[in-house]
Amino acid sequence: MSAYYNNIFELKNISYILLLIIIVIQLRNIYIGDSKIKSAQTNSILVKKEIKLPIGFVLVDEEVPNGPITIDREKDDGTKRKLIDLVRKEEIKNHFDYSSFEKLENSLPKQEDYICEIRTKYRPEVLKGYDISCPEHYVIKIEKSFYGRYKHDKKNCLMDKDKEFNIKSIDIDKDCGEDKTRNIKELCEGKNYCSITVTHHQYKDKCSKISKYLHVEYQCIKEEYIKKEKISIISFYNSIKVNTIEEHSVSEFYQYAKIHGYDFTFENLNYVAGRQIYFVKIYNLIYKIMEGLKYNKYNWVVWVDSDILVLNPNIKIETLLPSEKMKKVNLIVAYDYWGRKDICCGINAGVIIMRVCQWSLDMLMRTITYAYFNPEEELRLPEQIALNNDLIQKNETEHYVVVPPEWFNTRKIVKGSFLYHIMGGPSDEKLKIWHKFLNDTNNGQGWNDLTNEEFRKQVLDYYELPKEKQYQIRLQE
């Protein structure tokens, strides 16, 4: 009998041990899955992101840390909105398809490309590169890169510098060139998309009479978790006063950024006073893009003018971002048309959504210097026309998209608009327009009904249109 009970006791112990093992495994899976989801998804109504109050600002009500802000609590007129009251909880969550992400392979088959050297006097900055990319949720891992030519290679890059076939320039008895793995890793490693331009300007030409190429071996590696876009919003005004449209704007975007977990910076210093104040926008964007590149702090930077308000705080910046097919699109701007022939058919620079990448930095540098190289142009809307004309003159069509103005950059708002740009006219008149809107709509109730899912469908349908059916811009004076 004792042996029988001993066996039962041992079986129970084994059962308990197995049960504990199963529980531990399940808890581990929950923890791992939960940690991956939490890196990209927020389940609470407010993202717990520490955003410093802009310099000179205080909370309107110290008891409401997520509420509006002002530069003078004593004089504040009480008309600033508490945006969180207009936000629906389900719109704050990041709805990622985590189950599909889990099913993706950890890595894809290795690939290789032979990128022919471009023999030209032009600098690589103005040449179109060769693109390598990975599917969504994968990044590039560079295995090897060689610049030069392998011996007896009669398959790749067969033309010489004069674009003629020359057997002497391709059929060599030994490899000529050098390893460039480190260079290409710096350029492409860890990115989803990368553009490579191969010229003699970039690499030492050790094989001057030979047709050369850059041989790149790489692999697409799955990201560890679904990454949330890192977004920074920036605005500027150098003489802000209490109870003005500019103060309302700062208050709204401070709250909006806090709700969605974005970075927010308000600048109030004009540190390039020798130029028209409009160019401060471009200088600040350059600074933000460089900061993003250097420290990997942001994926996207969003500029908003100081006369822009948030109509629908439920809408996320991510809803407007390019689709997976649009890897080369680095700039999103709205069309500018007031029904006047003298101000027609260009971009409006009141809102600029820009990817943090080298293209953006290069384009901004050209924009900030545009007036110096085109002194005969009046540039009535200085930074806007400089940006508009540079995009056209440099034929950057594949890198930007011009969207309907009612999305986020128009004074003629409709229900479904994301932002309200009260452009043109003195500040006090703009404030009257804003107050009228608030009074007529009970602080914007009913203007926040459009969901991210509905808006994203509009956005993607527009992005799917042929380029010629999207808004077109032309040179401005």
Image (cartoon, grey):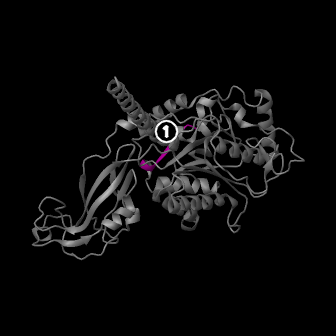
Horizontally, residue 133 falls left or right of residue 388, namely left
Q: Is residue 232 above or below residue 64?
A: below
Residue 128 visible in the picture: no
Q: Which of 331/297 is in front?
A: 297
Q: Is residue 246 above or below residue 357?
A: above
Segment colored magenta: 398-404
Q: Which of 404/474 is in front?
A: 404
Q: Residue at x 83, y 45 (%)?
A: 243
Residue at the farthest front position: 1
Q: Is residue 83 above or below residue 269?
A: above
- Looking at the figure, which quarter contains the N terminus? top left
Q: Position of residue 405 (x, y in %)?
A: 59, 38
Q: Residue at x 47, y 50 (%)?
A: 330
Q: Magenta stretch: residue 268 in it?
A: no
Q: Magenta stretch: residue 400 in it?
A: yes
Q: Which of 51/468 is in front?
A: 51
Callout 1 crowding tier (Cα within 10 Å): few <14, some 14–19, many ≥20: few
Horizontally, residue 324 falls left or right of residue 408, namely left
Amino acid type assigned to the residue bearing label 1 in the image: Asp
Q: Position of residue 178 (x, y in %)?
A: 25, 72
Q: Residue at x 61, y 56 (%)?
A: 383
User: Secondary structure under badge 1?
Assistant: helix
Horizontally, residue 211 falls left or right of residue 287, namely left
